[in-house]
Image (spheres, helix red, strand yellow):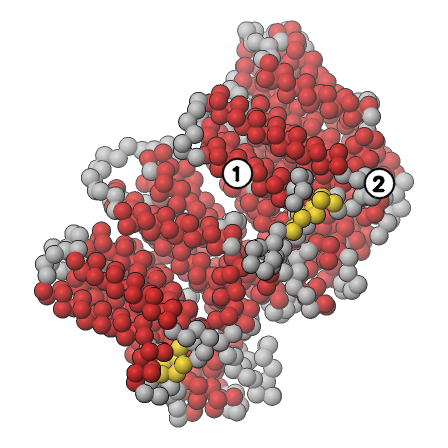
Amino acid sequence: MSFLSLIILVLAPSLAALFIANPWLTGDEAETRKLSIGFSAAFFIYSLFFLFKYDFQQGGLQFVQNLRLPPEGSSWIQSMGINFSLGVDGISLILVVLTTFLVMLACIASKNSIVKKFKFYYSMIFILTTAVLGVFTSKDLFLFFLFWELELIPMYFLISIWGSGRKEYSATKFVLYTFTGSIFMLASILAVYFYNHAQTGIFTFDMEALTFHSYNYPLMYELLVFWGFFIGFAVKLPVVPLHTWLPDAHVDAPTPVSMLLAGILLKMGGYGLVRMNLQMLPEAFKILAPVIVILGLINLIYAAIITFAQDDLKKLVAYSSVSHMGIVLIGLGALNTAGVTGAVFQMFAHGVISAGLFMMVGVIYLRTKTRSIKELSGIGQAAPKIFYFSLAIVLASLGLPLFIGFAAEVLAFIGAFTSNVATPVSMQCLTVIAIFGIILTASYLLWMLKRVFFGPVSEKVQNISDLNPGETVVFVSLVLVIAVFGFYPSAITNVFVPTISAIISR
Amino acid sequence: MNLLYDLRYALLPETLLTILILMCCVLTFLTAKKNYIYKVSTAGLVFVLLSCALLPFNSESVAIYGSFVSDAYSILFRFLIVLGSFITLQFAQKYTESFEKSSGEFYVLILTATLGAMFLAGSNDMITLFIALETLSISSFLLTGYTKSDKLSNEASLKYLVIGAASSAVLLYGFSFIYGITGQTNLTAIAEYLSKYSVNLILIISFLLVMGGLCYKIAAVPFHTWTPDIYEGAPVPVTAFLAVVSKMAGFAVIIRVLSQLFASLPVWSFSISIIAIATMTIGNLMAINQTSVRRLMAYSSIAQSGYILTGLAISTTTGIASMIFYLITYLFMNFGTWAAIEIFINKTGKDSIDAFDGLATKQPFVAFGFTICLLSLAGIPITAGFFGKFFLFQSIALAGIQNYFWLLIIALVNTVIAIYYYLRVVAAMILKPAVSDSNKNIVKPSMSLNAVLGITVAAVLLIGIFSAPVYTLSKYSALKVHFAISTPSISQNK
């Protein structure tokens, strides 16, 4: 086993969780937090090695690893064709690095917002990390599903114990929605598995084998399987009208958890769409691409319009997440390299930006104890540091050039504009409508900026303190990523473009 | 086939168990010491458990002139039954302390019920089957009403008796038709005869009657109505016994006998699918609004039966293997839940879900174990329950996703409903603030109950991680189940 082992990367966080949860580890909140930051920083650095060692020119799956059980080297559950096999290609690699990065920042951001049951909290964060990393690196469909489900329980506790407001309701809603979605996904997984067995006589959940096969599905069958997967991922992404869990869950979760929810959990949906729907079922995707583009358009515009009516700052940010995920759908529906690259890039960009936005809300809420936009005003004067960082993140979110959001959106829209997918209205028309949707994004974000940060200093804002060092670190790292990769986006896109070209040209 | 040969190679555990029962009977009269019989019966069951391992696992031995068969399938089930009854004894230790003189009978009855269950698992003759079933049932009736002064317990006992007697009659009526058709009581002979027999209405009626009579043991709809009342009224050790051991014996006989005789019937897969769907849906829907944990667990166990039955509807070896795997996991997760409930009831005397508020802060160990078992019942990875469900669904898919599409979809939807009510209990334990107990009884926590909880939780997690060997074992046993061969004119799938 070489130094770079995905199995270690995926399982190490749960070992860290066990270590933190063990009753012999006594320490106060600060010590536990520092320990967790140390762990998560180690995971981040370890994942960076994968990024540096990944052969971009070659692309495809690399670092493939299969777990073999001792006696005769059988796979995990041999008789079912279940294999504990992990591997990363460009798309998963970038999401893996995003995950470890955001988990590290979430641990740093947990100061002050997590005060009770902190040991349980950090162990749950690390179990969540294992689950998400497992989803992004699984090469086996069964394993993918297992990690997908595993993520529910830590998230349930993270929202329902440390959240605020109707936290239990939101947490249960989140679990039920995701679980319902994943049931459809399971049906599709079994359908794919069964069909492969019926055709080849081999029991296997291996994604490669299920993707690159010599047989063709009957069209109706493939479409049904496609919808099963799609519903599973649409709940997670989320796609309107399956999005209603998201505002509740985001608003009631504590700040670091919201950062993780928006930053990486939504990306699981997008990743699944690329990996299963696009890569595994290309024929169905070609037929349904117009539907996906139109769903994306609805996402983008509908969520943006709802945003205008929000008074709760966090809810506003949550709906803006839904809106931004519309761009992912539009990019995927374009079905060309530029579009899909834009979609994947948008997932990365949104991961960083939305984490920043939720951090901004968290920082304000911690100081003023309110999230109501009406009661906030003039933060720019009272706390200039908060203002500068928030400004940068908001501008990135609305797609200002030279920031990371811009590059992603432009790529997605170029892809959509040049796409030759046949839609009822021409693709170009839809793209233009989508670009007008971006104007909505800009207006609600700027309007929010005006009401919250400018104007006279309101009563609640008067005596607030500015950023503390920990928060500054989080903001600086996020803004750095936003600015550097906004200026030089090909540093990111190089990682996954070869993979995407291979998927598209198939 | 002489008697000694039978005893050594087919009936060794049963023989030892019978000796143990007689010993316990005698000891009940001889000694007034409370815990004496508990120790003797626990130690004795360890030997019975070990003796299961001495049976020839790879060959098929037939005993008592063909009326009892000991092969991998029945040995596995008998092992699980003894294991279950061993765990039940650990429950009983605390419970019987409250009975001054009459604690000995309880163990005798549990052991007798176990003997019946073991014979049921290996029976190969309609007469043996019926007698074994009655041995199990009559002991269970007595056990259910063991708390003589408790009205609920008495009511439960009476209900169980009436419904049990009725379903026995139904079963016998079904048997009488089969005897009328074939003139045989030996199941192998009957199966052979039926394979040449063309399907007619009488055979179908007898199938439905036998199925109905046996459904009572596994609490399948529409013979499930006794479950909630009995689970609520009976003493917890007895409830755990009924929920696991009795159900396991029921499944052992349903799987083997029904598939051997009736799997070729045109209504087979349809009627079992309907029963499975109705059982899981009604169980899950009724569980949602329960306020008592015991009633919730009753409906949950009904729903679990429904999931398990889906494996039978598809009549494939993988289906049977998945059922056996699920039953193994079910044993551990259910005993874990009941152990946690018993510890809790001992401590507080309450069984409403609200009473569990804040258990995680008061008794973190119990709350943790209970949570893991509930999540396993709900089918969340990385617990054993997840794999149990997954293997079942996978075997349905492998049997032909087109034929069993609705069965699969409804089973999947049911898992979503189930997660809601299991999470309700978890939420009460972990999220709600602790309420101060006003009537806190000073009860010493029972070591054996804590051990049961710890071991079952460990088993649930270990089977989750290393499911392959357990599945291989299930599959090996499942190979011993023969399906009735269809007559040429009738196709197996409807």
Residue located beneath label 1 in the image:
A15
Q: CA distance from mark 1 to mark 2?
A: 34 Å
For the point 36% across and 81% down, the residue is B68
| Image coordinates for residue A338, horizontal then vertical, percent | 85, 39
Q: Nearer the viewer, residue A390 or B366?
A: B366
Give me the chain letter of mark 2: A
Amino acid at dot 2: Gln
- Of labels 1 and 2, earlier in sequence is 1
At numbered mark 2, what does the secondary structure look like: helix, strand or loop? Answer: loop
| Circles 1 and 2 on the same subunit | yes
Determine the image quadrant of residue A364: top right
Q: Are marks 1 and 2 in contact (CB under 8 Å)?
A: no
The percent position of residue B53, horizontal first and vertical second, equals 38, 68
Tell which subunit mark 1 falls on: A
Label number found at residue A147? none
- Of the pair B312 and B45, the residue shown nearer to us: B45
B195 horizontally vs A68: left or right:
left
Q: Is residue A328 above or below residue B150?
A: above
Quadrant assignment, res A351:
top right
Query: Is A495 situated left or right of A456 in this image?
Result: right
Find disc 2 in the rendering and name its residue: A57
Side of A141 relative to A214 (left or right): left
The residue located at (61%, 64%) in the rendering is B397
Residue drawn at (32%, 87%) of the image: B2
Amino acid at dot 1: Leu
Q: Position of residue B485 (x, y in %)?
A: 55, 84
- A483 or A5, which is in the foreground? A5
